[in-house]
Every structure is written in structure tokens, then in C-alpha cells.
Image (tube, rainbow, N blue to C red):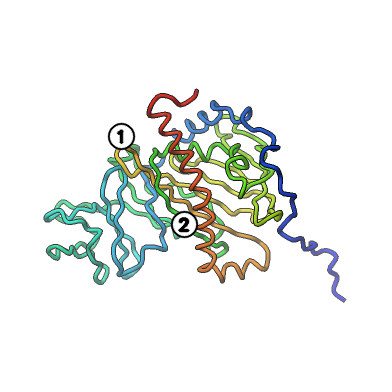
Amino acid sequence: MTDRSHKPRWTPPLRRRRTPDWATQTPTWQDARPGVIADALKTASARPSGNWFVVGASRDLRADERPHGRTVGGVEIVLWRSDTGLVHAGPGVCPHLGAPLRDSRVVCGTLVCHWHGLALDGAAFAGWEPYPVHDDGVLLWVRLDEIGGEEPLDMPVVPVRPATGNGVDAVFTAVGRCEPQDVVANRLDPWHGSWFHPYSFVDLTVARAPRGGVDDAFVVDVSFRVTGALVVPVRAEFTAPEPRTVVMRITEGEGATSIVETHATPLTGEGDGQPRTAVVEAIVAASDRRGFALARAAAPALRPLMRRAAGRLWRDDLAYAERRWALRSTGRFPG
């Protein structure tokens, strides 16, 4: 007979929680001190990005398909993937007569301008200089030294993720009228979670706020609402590894090591009176449960659901970020 006493007892991932009354929650405004959030934002802003900007999902850029056009800091960018899978990036303006290269075609890995047929293979040509680009398997990054204004880094600051092949990833993108710092400030205010998003979070408590210096993490105990009274309780940690990125990582509970990366990419140039920022959020879910292999197999069906859940949150959080920018731009922001 096999001795099973040493094996851990199976526990269900879900817990039943009586639906709380929104108005009877413990207020969090006294803990959510503006100075704490401002200090966390200042710490993040002082970290190097190496002039790297997230421009989209790796999966969305396929070989020998139409190129992708992006605008970062007011600069037009074009990206395409060669037939070997290599990603190229550069100015989105054709060096011949200024055609928008985002409308061109990729033929055998070469970008061919649709105005006069000028072909670009990713190398410098006639004043057109490529941009450094990085494909981390989930997101695409482009380095823009003139926009970033920092000391360049060879590689972007990519957060540590679950091991390749062990997770299910999805990427959600939205655009708001605000600056990157407003998006980052939203994420560095975990106290608003169960008040502003009661459909997703309950029992949220900030167990520890940053203490300064290298100790910059917010530690949060929270239950993710699945449906009705069913929730998944976890402990999560929020950190900002660079000025335009905030990472939420589950450290204890169901789905430990899963992360949500929120990247804020400016679309307009500095000083623009109507700034626009793209929120590119990568969700990488992982679990050590044996049944999670089924989730990996069903990833194509799960990704739209993951994006939908992120979109519901960002419908509210972009309103938060846009409101913050509107108050800051008119000198009416508190503090």
C-alpha cells in the first residue's frame, strides 16, 4: 500500500466570502497619505529606464504581415518582423518622400514603401536609422534616446516573470488623456482597490507601505472576486522597477509568482497641452496546481477573458489618472 500521508492535502483555490456592504468597509483615506504616494512616485521616477518604452504585445507582430505603426513621445515609429522572427524598428517616416511606413508592406522580411517601393531591411539607409528593439516574448520595447534623455541601457528593465511555458499571458492596451506619472501614481495607491473596484477586490489591507530607500514595496492582502461570494485570497507586492512601470506580484496564496505589469508609454511629446498615454498591461498567470496545464492548453480562449477583466479595471483607473492630470494641470491637485 502506498503511503500518502506525506503528500499535502488538496485544498480548493476558492473561498466563500459573504458579499460585504460597500459602505461599511473600513475607510482607507487616512492610510493613503498623499506624501507616501508622492514619495513612491519620486523613487520610481529616479530609477533608470535606459530610454526603453513598451510599444505593444510581442504576439501581435507576426512575420510577413503588415507592419505596426506606433507614436511615442510625438515620434512616429514603425515595427515589423522578418521571416526569421527578428523584430526591426525605426522612424515611421519614409526617408524618400515622407510616406507613412505603417501603411507599407512586408515582403520576405523587408519593409517595402507603398508609395515608391523603397525597401528597408532594418539597416541604416539614406538617413533612416533603426532604433534598438527588444522582444522579451510577451512585450516589445523600443529604445528612443532623444525622447528618454537618459543614459542608454543595452536592455530594458524587464520584470522577472514565471518561467517561460509555465504561465498564461495576455496583454491589454488602453489610452487616456494624462501623463505616465498619473498612471504610475494610480498603481502606487493600493488603498483605493476595494473602494473603487468592489466588483474585483474585497478585504483589501495594505500590510506594509514603503519605508524608503531600497525598501520600496507595498505589501497588500486582498481577495480577488471571482463571482458572487467566491474569492481568491492572496498576498501581493507592488513595486516600480523603472519610471514608467509598476509590477504587482503575487507572493503568497493561489497563483504565487503570477504578475501584472503596468507600463505607461507617452504618446505625445513633452509639454503637449493635451497629453495622451498608452497603458500596456501584461498579465502573466501561473500556478503549481496540476490542473493548470489545462489552462495553458486553453490559453487562446482565456486571453480575451483576461483582457476583458483588465479592461473593466482600466475603465475606472484611467478615469482616476485623467482626473489626477486635470487637477495637476490647473494647479488644483491637493497636497
Q: Position of residue 271 (x, y in %)?
A: 30, 33
Instruction: Give, as a three-letter code, the residue at label 2.
Output: Val
Kindly indicate the quadrant of the structure image that contains residue 64.
bottom left
Quarter holding the N terminus?
bottom right
Q: Residue at image x 64%, y 60%?
A: 287
Kindly indicate the quadrant of the structure image that contains residue 28.
top right
User: What's the CA distance linking mark 1 and mark 2?
Assistant: 29 Å
Residue at the bottom extreme of this rendering: 1
Crowding at mark 2 (Cα within 10 Å: few <14, some 14-19, many 20+): many
In the rendered structure, the answer to whether residue 282 lies left or right of residue 78 reads right
Residue at numbered disc 2: 171
Q: Position of residue 125 (x, y in %)?
A: 17, 56
Q: How many marks?
A: 2
Q: Position of residue 118 (x, y in %)?
A: 15, 63
Q: Residue at image x 52%, y 32%?
A: 40
In the rendered structure, the answer to whether residue 271 lies left or right of residue 115 reads right
Against 333, residue 127 (above or below) is below
Q: Which mark is residue 273?
A: 1
Crowding at mark 1 (Cα within 10 Å: few <14, some 14-19, many 20+): few
Q: Secondary structure at mark 1?
A: loop
Front residue of 64 and 230: 230
Instruction: Give, as a three-letter code, the residue at label 1.
Output: Gly
Front residue of 38 and 251: 38
Q: Disc 1 or 2, which lies upstream in sequence?
A: 2
Against 311, residue 271 (above or below) is above
Q: Residue at image x 71%, y 59%?
A: 13
